[in-house]
Image (cartoon, helix red, strand yellow):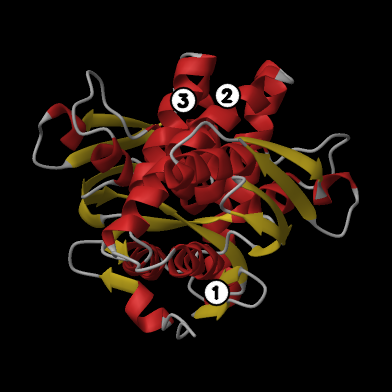
């Protein structure tokens, strides 16, 4: 059983330099309303095309997060995914839960409670967490060493209670 | 100040939901958005910064009872340093002329884009414009005259009345 991450060990602010570190990597916090404004403005500027751009940004971020977690040298995939889930929960990205996970077949279904993207954007007529879908693509492509695609089947922004992502290779 | 609810995946600072991003993720997000949307995205970042800064002054006054200029600035400087936004140094304030010069060490954007060809801190530029528009109750504009992303030792912002 992996022990919970202590927030005091996770967040390491330095008021003298103004640099905050999480898992020894530079980070910062942003109000969710600010993220909502940036994402909504992007969608207003480019319509549906914005979601493709946000997905691509998410892929890069997901691959980067994999690299950060891999540096912690987790001994098993279970420990690696624990760090992803607990680290992102502490970072306020929402709570991830695996409904289905098969490392052999390289497929998974992830339910996200309180997705920061859906909560930032608010109500929207279609699934809107393209950044998170790309994030999972980037993370699991690195983990499984193959090209992974992720579809957001259900999104809180459309009125569902949570978001659900299906990953396959 | 900081409330973490890992079972919900929610991070609360000063009673408001926040999200933590790595500087690396921020760089990926901004680079891809600017590549996808061109220069218009820089205006979006400025505007998002303006709204954040403008709201924050009112919020600080309501939540912490800080209304005097010095208190508001100190509150923002200390709070933003803890949140990883860099360290701000107020070089000069001229209330009569509504002119302010601020230096920022370790700005997020400058760290995200260490080798930019132009000043990189559009969000922070808007943020300061929003803060001082609220404090002076008059529209101001903000220019970034030096940027660590250009190789300067700090980022410098000059705030002056909008013409």
Quickly name the residue at label 3: B32
Quickly name the residue at label 1: B14
Crowd rating for badge 1 (residues with CA inside 10 Å; few <14, some 14–19, many 20+) = some
Quickly name the residue at label 2: A53
Upstream in sequence: badge 3 or badge 1: 1
Q: Are marks 1 and 2 on the same chain?
A: no
* Closer to the eye: label 3 or 1: 3
- Where is residue A169 drawn, in percent x and y? 61, 35
The answer to whether residue B111 is seen in the rendering is: yes
Between the residue at mark 3 and the residue at mark 1, the CA separation in whole angstroms equals 31 Å
Q: Position of B70 compared to A110: left or right?
A: left
- Where is residue A56 drawn, in percent x and y? 53, 28
> In front here: B90 or A24?
A24
Q: Is residue A140 above or below residue B116?
A: below
Q: For the C terminus of chain B, which image quadrant?
A: top left
Q: Position of A2 compared to B71: left or right?
A: right
> In front here: B32 or A140?
A140
- Occupied quadrant, residue B154: top left
The disc numbered 3 marks a residue on which chain?
A: B
The disc numbered 1 marks a residue on which chain?
A: B
The residue shown at (25%, 20%) is: B118
Between the residue at mark 3 and the residue at mark 2, the CA separation in whole angstroms equals 7 Å
Q: Are marks 3 and 2 on the same chain?
A: no
């Amino acid at each position: 059983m992996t022990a919970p991450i202590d927030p005091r060990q996770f967040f390491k602010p330095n008021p003298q330099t103004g640099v905050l570190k999480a898992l020894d990597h530079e980070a910062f916090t942003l109000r969710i309303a600010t993220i909502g404004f940036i994402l909504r403005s992007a969608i207003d500027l480019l319509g549906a095309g914005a979601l493709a751009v946000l997905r691509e940004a998410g892929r890069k971020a997901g691959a980067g997060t994999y690299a950060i977690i891999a540096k912690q040298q987790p001994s098993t995939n279970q420990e690696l995914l624990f760090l992803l889930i607990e680290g992102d929960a502490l970072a306020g990205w929402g709570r991830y839960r695996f409904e289905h996970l098969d490392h052999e077949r390289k497929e998974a279904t992830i339910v996200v409670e309180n997705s920061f993207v859906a909560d930032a954007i608010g109500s929207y007529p279609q699934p809107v967490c393209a950044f998170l879908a790309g994030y999972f693509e980037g993370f699991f492509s690195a983990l499984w060493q193959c090209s992974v695609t992720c579809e957001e089947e259900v999104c809180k922004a459309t009125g569902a209670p949570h978001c659900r992502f299906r990953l396959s290779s | 100040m900081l409330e973490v609810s890992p079972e919900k995946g929610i991070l609360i600072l000063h009673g408001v939901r926040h999200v933590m991003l790595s500087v690396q993720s921020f760089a990926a997000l901004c680079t891809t958005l600017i590549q996808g949307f061109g220069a218009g995205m820089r205006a979006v970042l400025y505007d998002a910064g303006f709204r954040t800064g403008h709201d924050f002054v009112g919020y600080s006054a309501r939540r912490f009872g800080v209304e005097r200029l010095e208190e508001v600035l100190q509150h923002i400087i200390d709070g933003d340093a803890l949140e990883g936004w860099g360290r701000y140094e107020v070089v000069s304030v001229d209330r009569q002329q509504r002119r302010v010069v601020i230096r920022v060490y370790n700005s997020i954007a400058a760290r995200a884009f260490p080798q930019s060809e132009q000043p990189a801190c559009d969000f922070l530029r808007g943020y300061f414009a929003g803060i001082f528009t609220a404090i002076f109750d008059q529209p101001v504009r903000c220019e970034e005259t030096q940027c660590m992303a250009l190789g300067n030792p700090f980022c410098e912002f000059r705030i002056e009345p909008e013409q």
